[in-house]
Image (tube, rainbow, N blue to C red):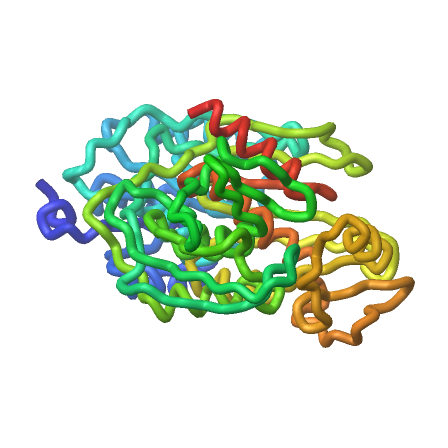
Amino acid sequence: MTESIHMGIRRVLIVDDDASLSRVLAGALKEEGFQTICSVDGQEALRLVHSFRPDVMLLDIWLPSLNGIEILRALQSTDVACPVIMLSGYGTIAMAVKAIQLGAFDYIERPCSLDRLVDSIRQACPPRDVAVNSQSSSVTSSPLMGHTRSVSPFAVQRPQRTLRCSVVGYGLGLQSGVKTGIILEPMPPDSGIVFRNVATGETVPAAIDFVTSTNFCTTLHRNGVTVRTIEHLMSALHAYGITNLLVQVGDEVPIMDGSATSFCQLIEEGGVVEQGGELEEFVVDRCYHVGQIDPASKFILVEPYDGFKVSYRLHYPQPLGIQEFTYEHRNGASYRFEIAPARTFAFVREVEKMHDMGLIAGGRLNNVVLLGDEKIVNNAQLRFPDECVRHKVLDLIGDLYLLGKSLRGYVRANMTGHTENVALVKQLSDAL
């Protein structure tokens, strides 16, 4: 038994001809609790595989003496079980495919976040008491981009979470215009997220099977209980990994300031606690899509990806035009900073139509970014230059949580809304 197994310290061999970059990476991984050694040469790296016995290798493609692909081939002829994570900023898709075919555990494009890299390392060499399927990762491709990723052959377990204590918030209902409140209460493991009407005590689970409307917001209904505009709260719960919660509310979740910031504050006020049970993520193993995958059409898809990432593209008349944004989720803090502040937006012509339908009575100049011809009507100071597309990502993250578990995959959406979001979740639910 090697020292790294005995002590529980995982060893990482970093193989990159940029010595300064390797030193920086080694220092960062040391802070994360890994033992590292670096090599700038392919031949030396193969020798270190036998002497250092790493638990995982970070391998660049472009190396002197032996390149990364050649090292992967050489490893196939040895009896050393060392997962390899390819790490390159200059590789092509063809090289990525070849690396995966030769047994690479993952292929990560630079630049990448440390969280993304550490997550992949921990999956490649999990704790020794966890049974892991040792089969090489499968390969799937995106019909949109031709992009290939490795997929872990096992579902990822995450601890269930709830709040430490109950919290209360107040606001207007966007659709009703009625002053309302919301109470978030802890629930035991395996309870799920449940909405309960404060007046009747009847409940409806936050699940795809109970979605009855996606007109301007996402609405749940069961046994006479209706709850509207759930997406912003669900988005924050998804981001913080809250799996068990009782949400006491009236007929509508309050709009607050039009974003998810207030819900993040409530979650942090209540305190997030991990519970005894565990919940599997939905690990995407192939491409699922809704709509024709074409830049001129509405579509949404999800493909295999070792993490949770969302890309959205919107195309509206001015003052919006085309906006694109990609968000890679790391934790609640990243969501609170990058996504949560983005507010609901609407065009004047849509607002007039919704008012005629008896909707958005709770819309105010301080909770909706109102857009007219060529300008923002209410002179709202945008929180981001691309606030509107970020709000689309916010809504999407919320609708995805109707699956009842976190998603491990890459979601790409083009000009879609709640209807398409929910249709994709239905596909995923049917695959469970």
> Residue 225: image x %, image y %?
49, 42
| Whether residue 69 is visible | no
Q: Is residue 330 above or below residue 288?
A: below
The x, y position of residue 181, in whole percent, is 48, 64
Quarter of the image with the C terminus in it: top left
Position of 426 compared to 124: left or right?
Answer: right
- Whether residue 298 sits left or right of residue 221 in the image: it is right
User: Number of labelled discs?
Assistant: 0
**Which residue is found at the position 45% from the left and 42% from the top?**
206
Determine the image quadrant of residue 70: top left
Q: Compared with residue 127, is residue 23 higher up or lower down, i.e. above or below? A: below
Is 333 displayed left or right of 301 in the figure? left
**Of residues 228 and 107, the one drawn nearer to the viewer in this rendering:** 228
* Residue for point 31% across, 61% down: 272
Using the image as rendered, state which of residue 228 and residue 329 is in the foreground.
228
Left or right: where 212 falls relative to 199: right
Name the residue nearer the viewer: 109 or 242: 242
Residue 266: image x %, image y %?
42, 67
Q: Residue at x 25, y 45 (%)?
A: 189
Q: Quadrant of the N terminus?
A: top left
In the rendered image, residue 293, in percent from the top left (x then y), is placed at 72, 31
Q: Residue furthest right?
A: 373
Res. 323 visible in picture: yes
Q: Residue at position x 30%, y 40% from top?
A: 279
Q: Which residue occupies the foreground of this view, 59 or 223? A: 223
**To which quarter of the image does residue 287 belong?**
top right
